[in-house]
Image (cartoon, helix red, strand yellow):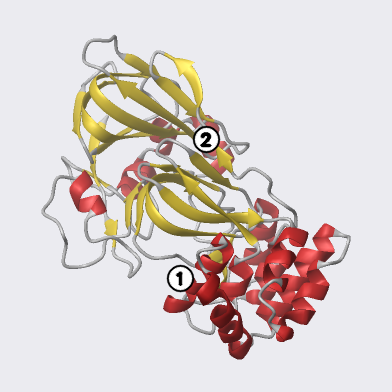
């Protein structure tokens, strides 16, 4: 087991304080720091702190020892998950991710929006209050909110949302807004929302997003989504086809190791509306927020229906026994509060807040002791 030296991605929407504070560095930072990446993603891999070896190179040198034979057979010679600390000070893009089958087919066909052949389901657990958009609201309710604005040019959208078939209602409304962007319509909607922003969260959302992305059709599409606020330890699960956007907050995110992101708006990055519409699941998501399952002894699980990763959280007290973290494949352990000792049965590792370590598949279950909080990402 070895300490990791992990890269920080500096995107414009990132925070000048959150990741630096977590790691005990001076804040505010000169540049916005958006994501701390812990894993073996080729674009920004972690390094083994002692040797300086990239985790990608270490895995390539002995994939079976580090990943386990079963994982090599299933995922190839790659770590199938990526662990992050995400710190959003501004909204991220309106986006979704493909299924594994869609990604494989599109990548094989050379589709430019697919950079690899993998899916990208993801889960975020809040470290602070965290605002996000996740999944579609009931189209009838969204339609009532839009109709109350009295914007005549919204009629095609309102007609679409009034259809009795929920999937058709959402599909036609989103397609109409994104396929033929109308900046003047967005301006009219925002102008109608502005004096009523305190009345309805969807109106306040439109005003907030338009301040950063004026004229972007994603402003209206965002009003069709669930706006949620996670409290610390609560989570949101983003399966394939789920339209979502992070708005503000700090969280631990775990995902399948892929770069396949299909964006529809609220971004200066590449947007691919036709492909986004093809992969979206046009269905109502009634309860986007998930809560951890208590396993006893300060251990909590965040179950997900995919084989790429499993996530556990342990809350530790110096006066209580060590907590055993489930799992026997490749694992990354991140300390998010306090200081802990992680024992792999060979060489224990001390983790301060903001530090992470990698355990290979050859190690048994890890025992964690100390005072604080840790997250473990692993293969199931």
Residue 368 sits in which quadrant?
top left
Q: CA distance from mark 1 to mark 2?
A: 44 Å
Taking the image as shown, residue 260 lies to the left or right of residue 174, namely left
Number of marks: 2
Few, some or many residues within 10 Å of mark 2 (<14, 14–19, 20+): many
Please give the residue where the numbered disc 2 appears in the rendered image.
Answer: 71
Question: On screen, 129 above or below 64?
Answer: below
Residue 173 sits in which quadrant?
bottom right
Give the secondary structure at mark 1: helix
> Which one is nearer the viewer's eye here, 186 or 2?
186
Taking the image as shown, residue 33 lies to the left or right of residue 143, namely left
Q: Earlier in the sequence, mark 1 or mark 2?
A: 2
Residue 258 placement (x, y as % from top left): 50, 55
Residue 343 placement (x, y as % from top left): 26, 19
Few, some or many residues within 10 Å of mark 1 (<14, 14–19, 20+): some
**Labels 1 & 2 near each other (Cβ < 8 A):** no
On residue 102, the disc is none
Question: On screen, 330 above or below 94?
Answer: above
Taking the image as shown, residue 322 lies to the left or right of residue 30, namely right
Residue 8 placement (x, y as % from top left): 27, 57
User: Which one is closest to the eye, mark 1 or mark 2?
Assistant: 1
Please give the residue where the numbered disc 1 appears in the rendered image.
Answer: 208
> Which one is nearer the viewer's eye here, 97 or 302?
302
User: Where does the N terminus fall, quadrant-wise?
Assistant: top left
Residue 161 placement (x, y as % from top left): 79, 68
Give the secondary structure at mark 2: helix
> Which one is nearer the viewer's eye here, 296 or 101?
296
Q: Residue at x 13, y 50 (%)?
A: 25
Residue 363 sits in which quadrant?
top left
Residue 190 seen: yes
Taking the image as shown, residue 349 lies to the left or right of residue 111, namely left
């Amino acid at each position: 087991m070895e300490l990791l030296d992990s890269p920080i991605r500096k995107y414009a929407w990132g925070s000048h304080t959150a990741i630096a504070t977590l790691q005990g560095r001076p804040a505010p930072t000169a540049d916005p720091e958006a994501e701390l990446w812990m894993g073996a993603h080729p674009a920004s891999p972690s390094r083994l702190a002692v040797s300086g070896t990239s985790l990608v190179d270490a895995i390539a040198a002995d994939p079976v020892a580090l990943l386990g034979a079963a994982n090599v057979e299933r995922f190839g010679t790659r770590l199938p998950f990526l662990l992050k600390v995400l710190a959003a000070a501004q909204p991220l893009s309106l986006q979704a991710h493909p299924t594994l089958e869609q990604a494989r087919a599109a990548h094989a066909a050379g589709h430019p929006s697919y950079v690899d052949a993998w899916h990208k389901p993801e889960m975020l657990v809040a470290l602070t209050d965290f605002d996000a958009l996740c999944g579609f609201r009931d189209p009838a309710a969204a339609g009532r909110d839009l109709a109350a604005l009295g914007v005549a040019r919204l009629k095609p959208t309102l007609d679409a949302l009034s259809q009795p078939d929920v999937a058709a209602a959402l599909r036609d409304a989103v397609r109409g807004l994104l396929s033929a962007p109308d900046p003047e319509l967005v301006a009219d909607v925002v102008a109608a929302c502005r004096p009523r922003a305190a009345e309805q969260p969807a109106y306040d959302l439109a005003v907030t997003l338009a301040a950063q992305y004026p004229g972007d059709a994603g402003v209206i599409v965002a009003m069709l989504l669930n706006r949620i606020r996670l409290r610390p330890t609560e989570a949101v699960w983003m399966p394939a086809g789920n339209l979502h956007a992070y708005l503000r907050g700090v969280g631990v995110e775990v995902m399948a190791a892929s770069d396949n992101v299909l964006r529809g708006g609220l971004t200066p990055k590449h947007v691919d509306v036709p492909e986004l519409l093809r992969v979206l699941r046009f269905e109502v998501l009634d309860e986007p927020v998930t809560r951890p399952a208590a396993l006893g002894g300060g251990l909590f699980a965040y179950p997900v229906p995919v084989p790429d990763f499993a996530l556990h959280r342990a809350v530790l007290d110096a006066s209580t026994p060590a907590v055993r973290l489930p799992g026997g494949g490749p694992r990354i352990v991140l300390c998010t509060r306090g200081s802990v000792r992680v024992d792999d049965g060979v060489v224990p590792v001390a983790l301060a807040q903001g530090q992470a370590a990698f355990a290979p598949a050859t190690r048994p279950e890890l025992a964690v002791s100390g005072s604080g909080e840790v997250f473990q990402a692993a293969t199931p």
